[in-house]
């Protein structure tokens, strides 16, 4: 019997929906080195915001980590177009 598809994309941030640029989640690619996400400390408050279904399965993006470090309560979901919510390239 086929397994149901997850209701999240492991290549997208579970908080804002933007690409998380996680080298370990990129399909068909072997990471050249450690991913940026292994070099960052994620606060317990930020991790607690991740929906249960995505915990330990989808990486939080750098923009949400930065927003958390800056003192924002919760990252703002970005546009569905895949653009950075902060307007960065």
Image: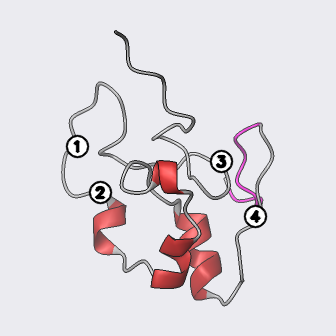
Q: Which of 59 and 47 is in front in this view?
A: 47
Q: Does the magenta stretch include residue 80?
A: no
* Alpha carbons under labels 3 and 2: distance apart: 19 Å
Q: Is residue 69 above or below residue 29?
A: below
Residue farthest right in this picture: 79
Residue found at x 73% / y 46% = 83
Residue found at x 77% / y 39% = 80
Assess whether mark 1 and mark 2 are in contact (beta carbons under 8 angstroms): yes
Q: Mark 1 points at which residue?
A: 31
* Few, some or many residues within 10 Å of mark 2 (<14, 14–19, 20+): some
Q: Mark 3 points at which residue?
A: 17
Q: Name the residue under label 4.
A: 86
Residue found at x 60% / y 81% = 68
Mark before the other along the chain sequence, 1 or 4: 1
Q: Give the range drawn in magenta.
A: 81-88
* Alpha carbons under labels 1 and 3: distance apart: 22 Å
Q: Which picture quadrant has residue 81?
A: top right
Q: Is the magenta stretch mostly helix, strand or loop?
A: loop
Mark before the other along the chain sequence, 1 or 3: 3
Mark before the other along the chain sequence, 3 or 2: 3
Q: Mark 2 points at which residue?
A: 35
């Amino acid at each position: 019997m086929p397994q149901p598809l997850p209701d999240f994309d492991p290549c997208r941030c579970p908080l804002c929906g933007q690409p998380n640029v996680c080298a370990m989640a990129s399909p068909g690619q072997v990471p050249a080195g450690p991913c940026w996400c292994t070099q960052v400390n994620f606060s317990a408050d930020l991790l607690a915001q991740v929906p249960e279904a995505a915990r330990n399965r989808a990486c939080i993006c750098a923009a949400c980590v930065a927003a958390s470090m800056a003192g924002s309560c919760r990252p703002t979901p970005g546009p569905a177009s895949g653009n950075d919510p902060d307007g960065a390239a």
